[in-house]
Amino acid sequence: MNLSTTFVDRVRAGAAALSERLDADGAEVALILGSGLAAIADGIEGPRQAPFATLPGFPRTTVAGHPGRVVAGRVHGRKTLILCGRVHGYEGYDASEVGFGVRVAAALGARTLIVTNASGGIDPAMRPGEIVAISDHLNLTGTSPLSGPNDERLGPRFVDMTAAYSPGLRHIAMAAAGDILGYPLQEAVYAGMAGPSYETPAEVRMLRTLGAGLVGMSTVHEVITARHAGMAVLGFSIVANHAAGVVDQTLRHDDVTRAANAAASALGRLVFDVIRRLPTGPGDR
């Protein structure tokens, strides 16, 4: 891309490439798979895939557990676009770049975004390996994907975040969890931090005071981007470990991806059943 290429041009180029190479135009649902969760994409019907590195405009992933590829196909007959891995602000990307894949999915027609991540459990009641529905978030990264001049072709200047995580989609997820997980799906507020260092015990105590039950280094910029684009959002978090200070432990990324891998099968079944249950019309999600 030359220096005169705008962000919208890059989004359109990425969407055109996915439409041509993966037949992704008209996708109904977009799914972002977090650390260690890429195997969920293996369950898609008629998969076509392409690495981020071969697609125009896409930022490159650099973190273990994020393979960086797009997979397109169908889930229970619905055309679905899966981003296997994501980029993060701590990799050196602007917040708008973190949301680039969401922009492309919206340009292809997706109206529903399902985000997944592996997180630290601030609430001691959150057990490692448990799947939790995200009810809201705290963006504590200090940045926003909407900073700077607004392009009305992407969305409005100001965005209502009152129901950032769709209550209707969470209701569907609760019903699906009863059949898939064998335990009731808890809800929690997710605190998005800048990273890449894990939080200190003092920071975790602060986050608990602020009302957060989960903490991680992703998701919030993607969700803000999706709401700006008019997408309905559902979020799932795998509790990979207790957050710092909740129990006596050392935090390691390998442990996070290992926990996510262990829970990936159950999360995949849950996500795919949610997609099956989505309303067929454009009603309120």
Image (cartoon, grey):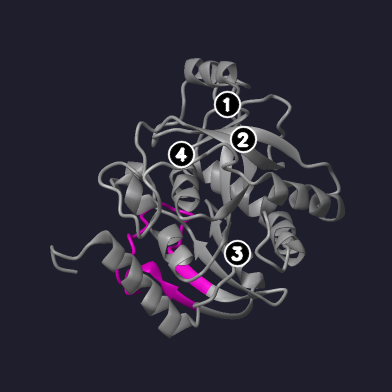
Residue 217 numbered tag: 4
Do tag 3 and tag 1 residues touch (Cβ < 8 Å)? no
**Residue at which label 3 appears:** 39
Q: Position of residue 106 (x, y in %)?
A: 47, 63
Q: Report helix, strand or loop for mark 1.
A: loop
Residue 200, above or below 195: above
| Comparing labels 1 and 4, the label whose residue is closer to the camera | 4
**For discs 3 and 4, the disc positioned in front in the rendered view:** 4
Comes first in the chain, label 2 or label 3: 3
Question: What's under tag 2, amino acid-wise?
Answer: Asn
Numbered badge on residue 241: 2
Q: Position of residue 283 (x, y in %)?
A: 68, 59
State which tag comes first along the sequence, 4 or 2: 4
Q: Which residue appears at 50% of the width and 63% of the height?
A: 83
Identify which residue, 30 or 42, lies in the foreground.
Answer: 30
Q: State the residue at coordinates (45%, 42%).
A: 159
Q: CA distance from mark 1 to mark 2?
A: 9 Å
User: From mark 2 to mark 3, how far is it between C-alphas?
Assistant: 20 Å
